[in-house]
Image (cartoon, grey):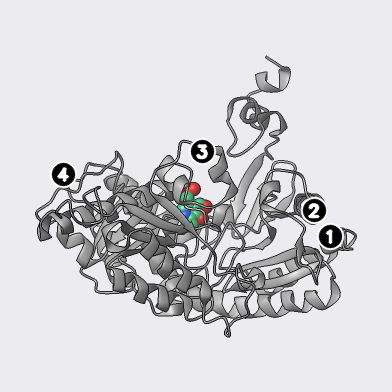
Amino acid sequence: MDTAVNNPEDFSSIQQKYLMQCWGVQGRYDPIPVEKTEGCWIHTTDGRKIFDLRSAHECINLGFRHPKVIQAMREQMEKVIYVTDDFATESTAKLARTLAEITPGNPNKRVWFAQSGAAAVEAAIKVARFYQYNQVVKKGLPTTSEPHLYPYPYKIISRYRSYHGATAGAMSVSGDPRRWLQEPFVMPGVVHAPDAYCYRCPFNHTYPDCGIACVEYIDQMIELEGGSHKVAAVIIEPIVGSNGIIPPPPDYLPRLREICNKWDILLIVDETMTGFGRTGEMFAIEHYGVVPDILVVGKALGVYCPLTAAIFSRKVAKTFKENLFGHGQSYSGHALACAAALASINVLQEEKIVDHAREMGEYLGYRLTALAEKHRSIGDVRGLGLFWTIELVKDRHTKEPLRRATEKYAPTVVSQIAEYLLREKNIYIPADKFGIWIVPPLIVTQEEIDFLVDAIDDALAIADTEVK
Ligand SMILES: Cc1ncc(COP(=O)(O)O)c(C=O)c1O
């Protein structure tokens, strides 16, 4: 054992030696020791104050250590932390009701709790298939003369630019390069669709003249994949997160909803990253007036506790009245995590934090857009609320990217920018994204936005040198 690891105070070296870092080459792991966290800031043991511009994996929408949430957690800990769902606890019951009420659609829903986005996505996929199975059984099993041998619809359509989690099923529906690390052991029955990515339209069209060809393509895909007999659900992030912060054109999601209705296919909306005010509405799907059949939420739901949920619409939930919900896990409905989530939703509402995110988002968007005038490396600036990205290119005309999908873990200009911002400006952003990631806690102030954008302005000089 080396001396640093022998010193119990040097927990950074202990962590470096014993912790398996997510998505990292362990020999390069170099964690920064933290003294405390406050608001948008991480204070290190050597006296630095670092702005967390990724909101702790987009979890701490309220900033670190909101006193009302901490108080609610303290009170809950004195009562009950966790019992199984054979018992009822006030925080779990009330959170399930609150989620049923504040999410789009008829409040007569049912909620299942997990601890990771991936686990909630797995539940959503499994339930979509159960639902379709129950429908087939209700209608009577098809005869063998019909064009399907497998007795119920099971295929899931997702999109290339998507991330839904790291477990086998969630990774299979992800399009993100991280899926390649799972292959070939992915879940059968997943088909990937092209994206609603106007800056790099997969059909080389321009919106709105395109007639939203990307969503019409999904209609064709469903038919060619066997239609209602074969396809169980479409899963989407309403605004793509990890794969580029890509809001779809305004009529894309309403049309996708129509297509799913036409084929009697469930629409699963994954708001793990976009939920709870991030985009300037409580849920991103509200920008588009669409009601999903299954909604997945996570990250900012529990703020300081791992808590996620799959929320089933009345139509889906009612099939389980007489049929088994064949799914579960320990810690589901954890009372302490639910108390934190309830308190967080109250704070979002009482302190009008979603309105604040919308206002600050407009200012952030205005400042970032202005940077595009100055920096040749900026291909596109896009976002909504406090969910923004700057996409970097080597050439504005050809749109040749500064980071390709195949370079996710290679050192690129984006990782150099992340290193520069951390080292020189005390700003933490992820190094593995496709552009610069601007996702601050929703409590960010206008002064903090100025500080962040000025620093990004300086950092972009690194990218400009790569421009042809
Ligand atoms: C949209 C989306 N879904 C699911 C997940 C997976 O969540 P978790 O990492 O909590 O499993 C993520 C994580 O980034 C996500 O962005």
* Amino acid type of the residue that numbered disc 3 sits on in the rendered structure: Gln
Residue named by callout 3: 182
Between the C-alphas of marks 4 and 3, the distance is: 36 Å
The residue depicted at 25 percent of the width and 47 percent of the height is 150
> Which numbered disc, 1 or 2, marks the residue that appears first in the sequence?
2
Residue named by callout 1: 463
Image side of residue 271 versus residue 458, left or right: left
Residue 463 in the image: state x and y as whole percent.
84, 60
Residue 362 in the image: state x and y as whole percent.
62, 80
Helix, strand or loop at mark 4: loop
Most foreground residue, 191 or 441: 191
Between the C-alphas of marks 2 and 4, the distance is: 53 Å
Query: Are dots 1 and 4 in contact, CB under 8 Å?
Result: no
Q: Residues within 10 Å of mark 2 (few under 14, many from 20)?
A: many
* Amino acid type of the residue that numbered disc 4 sits on in the rendered structure: Asp
* Amino acid type of the residue that numbered disc 1 sits on in the rendered structure: Ala
Between the C-alphas of marks 1 and 2, the distance is: 6 Å
Q: Is residue 91 above or below residue 374?
A: above
Q: Give the image quarter of residue 365.
A: bottom right
Query: Are dots 2 and 3 in contact, CB under 8 Å?
Result: no
Query: Are dots 1 and 2 in contact, CB under 8 Å?
Result: yes
Foreground tag (1 vs 3): 3
The answer to whether the residue bearing label 2 lies less than 8 angstroms from the nearest atom of ligand 1 is no
Helix, strand or loop at mark 3: loop
The residue depicted at 48 percent of the width and 59 percent of the height is 67
> Which numbered disc, 2 or 3, marks the residue that appears first in the sequence?
3
- The label shown at residue 86 is 4
Query: Are dots 1 and 3 in contact, CB under 8 Å?
Result: no
- The label shown at residue 413 is 2
> Which numbered disc, 4 or 3, marks the residue that appears first in the sequence?
4
